Image: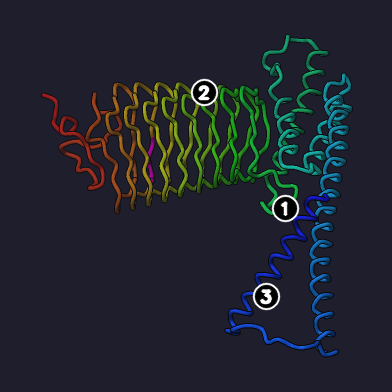
Amino acid sequence: MGPVVAWTFLTAIAVAGGVFFAVWSLLNAQGLKAEPKLSSSTLFDLVKLSFGVVAGAGALVALVVAYRRQRVDEDGALREDTRLHTERFTAAVSQLGAESVAVRLGGVHALAGLADDAPTRELRQTCIDVLCAYLRLPYTAETDLPQGDADAHHAYLALREVRHTVIRLIRDHLCLTPDHPDSWQGHDLDFTGVVFDGGDFDRATFSGGRISFIGAEFLGGQVSFGLARFSGGTVVFADAEFSGGQVNFGGAEFSGGQVSFDGAKFSGSTVLFGAATFSRSRVTFGDAEFSGGTVFFGGAEFSGGTVLFGGAKFSGSTVLFGGATFSGGQIFFGGAEFSGGTVFFGGATFSGGQVSFGDAEFSGSRILFGDAEFSGGTVDFSAAVGAMPSGGLATSDNPRPAGLILPQAWLTPTP
């Protein structure tokens, strides 16, 4: 600290000298008047000036010393907080590996509390990472348990309770407002490969960070994102498998960020986007496979943003847009393959935006527009290839709505 004080003192002297010469210049003084001897008042003024300079320099040095001491105290407090956090963290992680389910539940709550008390954002993220890692551990779903094995079923129920507690605690922290000190919004959540047989993310807000469900398996029960808000960050369901149960995005709000279902496989689940609103987000189903189950957009509102089904394969699923409202934004099925299943727009309202099936290939699906209303916007099949899907889009004897654009081959009667 000695060199710092010395430099501070010298800096103060230099600043005082600079101020003196600046004032001298402003007064336009031409020189000093010689005095044969100093009067007592002049001498007293010089003494006061000297003490003032010394006092100012001393105050500056004291300020620097106090600041340095405060920094040292703060650094020491942070080191102590970090040390205590590390000790509690080690104990909580040990609880997660205990045989007793009650002890594991205690470890889960202890880690969540540690995340709330973490002295730094990085330490909070570490606690969240451990909770997510617990969900990524190997897990046997109920459908894969040995038949009639009561002990195995009991162990499954106990582990399921611990896992669902982790999910619930994460949800609770994502429901807090961003300015709340315990909010986990903006942190990364890694659910890569996690097996879900239920879980509740209702009303959670995804406003930043990266949320990964890559390769996750939704096998049963209900996983709910009802009324959740996707307003920033990236949520990735790429290569996830929806083979059972229900995944609910009902009433969810997609107003920012990106949600990706690229490469996901829908073979048995019901995925609900009923009454969801899409205003600015980018939601993609690129190369997804729909071979069974139902994807429901009934009553959804599309007023902006983009929903992409580029390269998706529809061979058995039912995709329902019944009663949906299209007033803006874009939905693309470019390059998609329709060889089975049904896409239903019955009762939908088109007042803006665009639904495009550019380069889509049809060989067996049904597309229905029963009671759909067109007052603006377009549904464009003009670049589609293959046979016209069944469902009576339009024929030469059945005029089509102005917003429904079909390729000429579909309008020409087959000889």
Q: Tell me what residue is drawn at x 65 percent, y 70 percent.
A: 18
| Pointer 3 local density, CA inside 10 Å: few below 14, some 14–19, many at least 20 | few
User: Disc 3 versus disc 1: distance between alpha carbons?
Assistant: 52 Å
Q: Position of residue 185 (x, y in %)?
A: 65, 44
User: Disc 3 versus disc 2: distance between alpha carbons?
Assistant: 74 Å
Q: Is 16 located above or below residue 204 in the figure?
A: below
Residue at the spot of label 1 = 180
Q: Quadrant of the C terminus?
A: top left
Q: Amino acid at mark 2?
A: Asp
Q: Earlier in the sequence, mark 3 or mark 1?
A: 3
Q: Amino acid at mark 1?
A: His
Q: Is 8 located above or below residue 230 in the figure?
A: below
Q: Amino acid at mark 3?
A: Phe
| Pointer 1 local density, CA inside 10 Å: few below 14, some 14–19, many at least 20 | few
Q: Nearer the viewer, mark 2 or mark 1?
A: 1
Of helix, strand and loop, which one carries label 2? loop
Q: Position of residue 25 (x, y in %)?
A: 59, 79
Q: Nearer the viewer, mark 3 or mark 2?
A: 3
Q: Nearer the viewer, mark 3 or mark 1?
A: 3
Tag shown at residue 239:
2
| Chain part drawn in magenta | 344-348
Q: Tell me what residue is drawn at x 41 percent, y 42 percent.
A: 306
Instruction: Using the rendered view, name the quadrant where residue 220 is placed.
Output: top right
Of helix, strand and loop, which one carries label 3? helix
Q: Is residue 289 left or right of residue 11?
A: left
Considering depth in this image, is 90 or 413 the residue closer to the camera? 90
Q: Earlier in the sequence, mark 2 or mark 1?
A: 1
| Pointer 2 local density, CA inside 10 Å: few below 14, some 14–19, many at least 20 | many
Q: Position of residue 398 (x, y in %)?
A: 20, 40
Q: Position of residue 161 (x, y in %)?
A: 78, 28
Residue at the spot of label 3 = 20
Of helix, strand and loop, which one carries label 1? loop
